Amino acid sequence: MAKHDSIPEKIMHLKREKPKQEWGVSDSENVIDQLMDLFVKGSEKTLNTNANFDYLAYLFADIARHAKGRRYFIETQAYDSVIPITKLIVFTEHKSLIRRKGVASTLKNSLFDIKSHTVLISDSAVNLLPYLLLPLMGPEEYPDDESLSMPVEVQLLPPDKERESDSSIISTHLESIMLLTTTREARDSLREKQVYSVIREVHLAVEDENVRDICQRLVDVLQRDEADDSARGAGRVEGEVDDNDEIVDLV
């Protein structure tokens, strides 16, 4: 149903009675908030022994395809003073393939809001980057000069660290990082945090043509010389990227 363009907006405006306090589900009358709380608190069948609510991740991804929907995920909500996307990022390495896929797509679709990138990658705000990188990383060891510049969360990973097994999810996270290269500020941050080094290892380890193609495009962006970008006006972005645009055109 959410594939129909009219449904996500209806969900965003739909209200219903707050769940009973003893259920401990949500304190909001907004349906989208209640669904988010069900997804987070109901994982592992902790709210309902017959449901894990994993498929809500796909609903969130569809909602985030629309401007109003993606703003929900990237803006602080009044009822709990939390940015909803921070509730989702912890599931990028969840055992459920459905959760991982849906969350990966929700993150990517939310990143079409270019103005939010600074907050989303800020260490003191959402801190999104480590949760995009962790699924991409395996047991590789990095030289100290690379590792120590990476986000703390991805340093010193155990030797049995496993890379995401689903190549479509890897592609989605790579596309999210490609979206983050839209602005010069974000590109500089990605370079400082040695994202190139992670992409290099993904390219070597994953035998999937789509993954390797995105890796190559990312390398081209992150390794390019931007000394004269100011003269060309590169990196200036207003508003949002159209989610029908090809990722390759974002730079």
Image (spheres, helix red, strand yellow):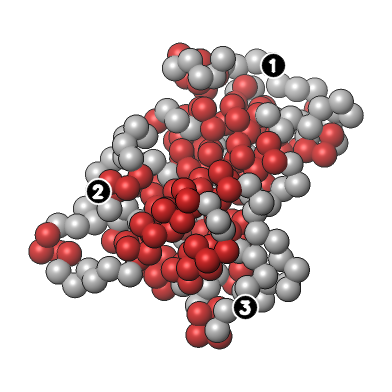
Residue 79 vertical position relative to residue 248 in the rendered view, above or below: above
Q: Which is more N-terminal, label 3 or label 1?
A: 1
The residue carrying mark 1 is 17
Q: Residue drawn 65% across and 54% down?
A: 164
Classify residue 108 as left or right of residue 161.
left
Observer-nearest of 6 and 200: 200
Query: At which x and y percent is residue 94?
Result: 72, 48
The residue carrying mark 2 is 237
Q: Tell me which amino acid carries mark 3.
A: Glu
Q: Tell me which amino acid carries mark 2.
A: Val
- The mark closer to the camera, 2 or 3, is 3
Is residue 130 shown to the viewer in this render? no
Q: Farthest residue in the bottom direction?
A: 144
Which secondary structure, mark 3? loop
Q: Tell me which amino acid carries mark 1.
A: Glu
Q: Which is more N-terminal, label 1 or label 2?
A: 1
Residue 71 vertical position relative to residue 191 in the rendered view, above or below: above
Classify residue 228 as left or right of residue 62.
left
* Residue count near mark 3 (Cα–Cα under 10 Å), binned few <14, some 14–19, many ≥20: some
Residue 71: quarter of image: top left
Observer-nearest of 177 and 26: 177
The residue carrying mark 3 is 141
* Residue count near mark 2 (Cα–Cα under 10 Å), binned few <14, some 14–19, many ≥20: some
Q: Residue drawn 42% across and 28% down?
A: 66
Q: Are marks 2 and 1 in contact (CB under 8 Å)?
A: no
